Amino acid sequence: MKVGIFDDARIGVVRHNTVHDVTAILDRVPAMRYGIRQGDALIAALPSLQPVMEEMASRAPGVPLAAVALRAPVGHPGKLLGAPLNYQDHVQEAQADPATFAVAQIRRIHELGFFLKAPSSLAGCAEGITLSHTDRRTDHEVELAVVIGRRCRGVARQQAIDVVAGYSIGLDVTLRGSEERSMRKSIDTYSVLGPYLVTADELRDPSNLDLRLEVNGEVRQQGNTRDLIIDVPGLIEFASAWYTLEPGDVIYSGTPAGVGPLKRGDSLLAWVEHVGSMKLSVQ
């Protein structure tokens, strides 16, 4: 199933480039109690709600996706985790350009670990990217994004896929500079997620997915998740050894070579095999 959030926080099931409004499903989502960390309530309840949502979608009229504003498909993520330098060709790209990539930050992902992006930086494709600190370079980084489906800690890689709610396309937008990664990558709209969530039952194997990013019609990045230094199960194992993962947490799995600068007026087209594609603009 493909689940999206659109317009004024409407919930939709996406079928054949149309969206079917199932917002009434929120009446079945358990209420969150103030002061208790539970993660994203809709993502947590998704396994039990999917059959009902499918039935509701079958009765709801379809609206063309192009006619709605798609928001980030996770409403309340507790953590956005980024996997730095997780493709070997991107490592080599960074090593070859010390003017852009700080030498101190070019180390193996096993040494660096994850960086954290502020949830306030999350944006959907309808919002696009609003550049900040325009006197400096801001780069695009296309990635497979992994959305966690249930609370977990210390997950072995053999069971890692079992804790995944689904997958989206991620853009880890990055301001270049000497500050900590988490600061430069947490600017508003610098964590794009979309166009919707493809549930894990629909995409069971994330280990061999092509991905691509075009800027103004020019292919800038292309790769395949088989070339991840730490694959998706490994990332979940690694992350859950350090943090309790909650429903709605998002892991940005890493970007292949070809990262490059953005400017106002750019038009982006991001695509991940078996997930979909999303268009967005840069302001």
Image (cartoon, rainbow, N blue to C red):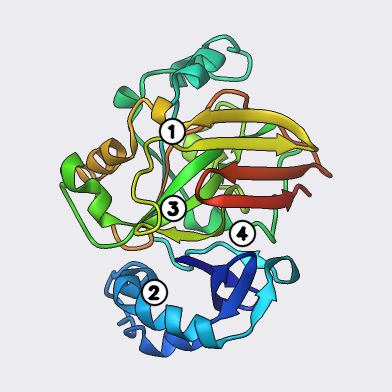
**Amino acid type at image mark 3:** Tyr
Disc 1 to disc 4, C-alpha distance: 22 Å
**Residue sitting at x 71%, y 30%:** 219
The residue identified by callout 4 is: 124
Q: Position of residue 177 (x, y in %)?
A: 60, 28
Disc 3 to disc 4, C-alpha distance: 14 Å
Question: Which mark lies nearer to you, 3 or 4?
Answer: 3
**Amino acid type at image mark 1:** Thr
* Viewer-nearest residue: 209 or 265: 209
Question: Which mark lies nearer to you, 1 or 4?
Answer: 1
Which residue lies most toward the right here?
265
The answer to whether any part of residue 244 appears in the image is: no
The residue identified by callout 3 is: 167
The residue identified by callout 1 is: 225
Pointers 3 and 4 in contact (CB under 8 A)?
A: no
SS state under label 1: helix
**Residue sitting at x 44%, y 30%:** 84
Q: Please rate how many residues cluster around mark 1, counting C-alpha atoms within 10 Å: few if below 14, some from 14 to 19, many from 20.
A: many
Q: Position of residue 181 (x, y in %)?
A: 49, 34
Q: Position of residue 212 (x, y in %)?
A: 61, 36
